[in-house]
């Protein structure tokens, strides 16, 4: 079985930032998956599950209502490792080109008084939210993106080293 692209990223070197995870072609359309990494994997603690859930609700709502971007949003959701999110957009954009959108999305969390869709009829785990902690993570990440917006490292995906044998077999370090 082939290793999927997200497992070929060197998680010992990745830092918080916005990275292109993959670009797929569906007919005549390009679809881009972005890795929006909020914490440094295996170095910083994962994002609290209730805060992550709250960030998912608030930012998904923000993105799907942004007048400039809403037609391009396909998906916003958490990574299983709870260190970030996946954003899937129609088209191809450089990570730096969507950084303003994400800074504004994370800043919008600070202004939120109630979590959208946090009712039993709307959410499969409506009681698992933490707005205060979500605001803390959002404030921290928005400030980090703003402070580092000219640093190319927060937009460049580190790849795992691969050993390739003489007969062409690849071995991954993960």
Image (cartoon, rainbow, N blue to C red):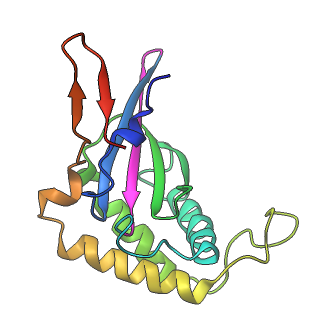
37 falls in the magenta region: yes
The vertical placement of 139 against 74, above or below, is below
Q: Give the side of residue 14 with respect to residue 136, left or right.
A: left
Q: What's the residue at 29%, 80% (across, down)?
A: 143
Q: Is residue 158 left or right of residue 77?
A: left
Q: Does the magenta run of residues contain 48?
A: no
Up/down of 149 relative to 132, above or below = above
Question: In the depicted view, which residue is nearer to us: 114 or 166?
Answer: 166
- Residue 47: x and y in percent read 50, 73
Q: Position of residue 113 (x, y in %)?
A: 62, 87
Q: Quadrant of residue 127?
A: bottom right
Residue at the spot 24% in from the left edge and 57% down from the top edge = 13
Magenta stretch, overall SS? strand
Residue 48 visible in this rendered orientation of the protein = yes
For the C terminus, give its image quadrant.
top left
x and y percentages locating residue 116 in the rendered image: 68, 72
Which residue is more in the foreground, 151 or 15?
15
What are the residue bounds of the magenta stretch? 27-39
Residue at 16 percent of width and 58 percent of height: 153
**Residue most toward the bottom?**
132
Residue extending farthest to the front is 166
In the rendered image, residue 51, in percent from the top left (x then y), is placed at 58, 77
Q: Residue furthest top?
A: 167
- Residue 96, quarter of picture: bottom left
Q: Is residue 172 left or right of residue 165?
A: right
Q: Nearer the viewer, residue 13 or 103?
A: 13
């Amino acid at each position: 079985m082939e290793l999927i692209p997200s497992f070929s990223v060197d998680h010992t070197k990745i830092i918080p930032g916005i990275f292109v995870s993959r670009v797929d072609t569906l007919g005549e359309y390009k679809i881009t998956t972005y890795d929006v990494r909020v914490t440094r994997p295996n170095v910083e603690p994962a994002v609290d599950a209730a805060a992550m859930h709250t960030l998912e609700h608030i930012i998904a709502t923000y993105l799907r209502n942004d007048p400039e971007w809403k037609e391009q949003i396909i998906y916003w959701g958490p990574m299983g490792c709870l260190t970030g999110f996946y954003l899937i957009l129609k088209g191809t954009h450089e990570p730096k080109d969507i950084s303003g959108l994400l800074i504004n999305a994370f800043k919008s969390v600070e202004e939120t008084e109630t979590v959208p869709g946090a009712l039993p009829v709307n959410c499969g785990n409506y009681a698992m939210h933490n707005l205060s902690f979500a605001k803390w993570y959002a404030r921290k990440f928005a400030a980090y993106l703003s402070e580092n917006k000219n640093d190319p490292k927060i937009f460049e995906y580190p790849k795992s080293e691969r050993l390739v044998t003489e007969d062409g077999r690849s071995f991954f370090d993960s």
